[in-house]
Amino acid sequence: MRSTRVLSTALLALGLGLGLGLAAGPAAADSTPSASPSDDASAPTSAGTSFRTATEVEQGQTATASASTGDYLYWSFPADAEQRPTVRATVKLPDAHVAQTWQIDVYDGLRRRQACQYGAQTRTAAQGAASVEVACVLRTVRSWSEEWANDPLPGTYYVRLTAVGLKAADLGLPVSAELRVDSKDIGGSAAVDGWLAEPLVPGVAVTSAAQEDDDDSDSAVLSSLEPDDGWSSGWWSDRWVWTAVGGVLAALAGIGGYALTRGSGRPARVPPGA
């Protein structure tokens, strides 16, 4: 009987531990890509010169642009909750140039500069190099954050590409740039308790105000970018599934432990009148 109780206790503890571990979210979701490659025939072939004129790029597209050294190139792309965007840019340099340093910066919908988890955000091309590549892997986009925090939130993101510390001899030289944005779907392991009322996209305040005044009136929307499957609501994630599975396993372990420890009835050594 003692060994049976020890076994049932171990089964119950195993079920509870497995349930809590599964509720934390699967680590394998890190390797699941969320953006499928799109048709590059519709990819933009120019870049903006400021935040307001940033060229819209969908994830999975390869955008191109021709410019001159010293110009600021701007693009924008959408990123949803539980995504980890990776921004890569390749600059093809002229045949004759001195050493150049190129830098890529990413800003969120509030135009706050976002830090890169890893990647060569700034890179120097040696004299005579044919091209230089820079990259920035952002932190996972959260569905909600404190007002004082600088966490990446769902909405439009801006990319700025430029050469820094140029000498006068290199100003105005022709260059061409390629930009591509991809994301990994992190899944429920990055889910938080909360979500934004609206994604941080240009024109959302103007649109909301117009809808309050007149639902049928035409409102100005400054950005048409959004993920292919629309913006997520923020409350659902695969964490709910794994939490439910863990709860079921824990309940089954508890039932099994009870069935093992309850015995076959009244012990034979107990007198009938006791």
Image (spheres, rainbow, N blue to C red):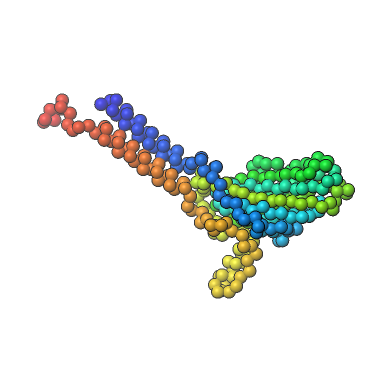
Q: Dividing the picture into quarters, in which one does residue 116 lie?
A: top right
Q: Is residue 216 visible?
A: yes
> Residue at 71% across / 54% down in the picture?
64
| Of residues 200 and 129, the one drawn nearer to the viewer in this rendering | 129
State the image coordinates of residue 229 (x, y, percent, origin top left): 53, 57
255 versus 151 height, above or below: above
The image quarter containing residue 205 is: bottom right
The structure residue drawn at horizontal position 62% and vertical position 52%, both measured from the top left corner, is 60
The image shows residue 128 at horizontal and vertical percentages of 83, 42
Which of the pair 155/69 is nearer the observer?
A: 69
Q: Nearer the viewer, residue 193 or 30?
A: 30
Residue name at image x 69 percent, y 51 percent: 179
**Above-or-below relation of 245 to 50:** above
Q: Is residue 2 left or right of residue 97?
A: left
Q: Position of residue 152 (x, y in %)?
A: 61, 50
Viewer-closest of 1 and 77: 77
Residue 5 image position (x, y, % from top left): 29, 29
Residue 80 placement, left or right of 14: right
Q: Residue furthest right?
A: 169
The quadrant the N terminus occupies is top left
Q: Quadrant of residue 269?
A: top left
Question: Can residue 114 be seen from the camera position used here?
Answer: no
User: Quadrant where the C terminus lies?
Assistant: top left
Extreme residue toward the left, this view: 273
Determine the residue positioned at 50% across, 46% down. 188
**Numbered disc total:** 0
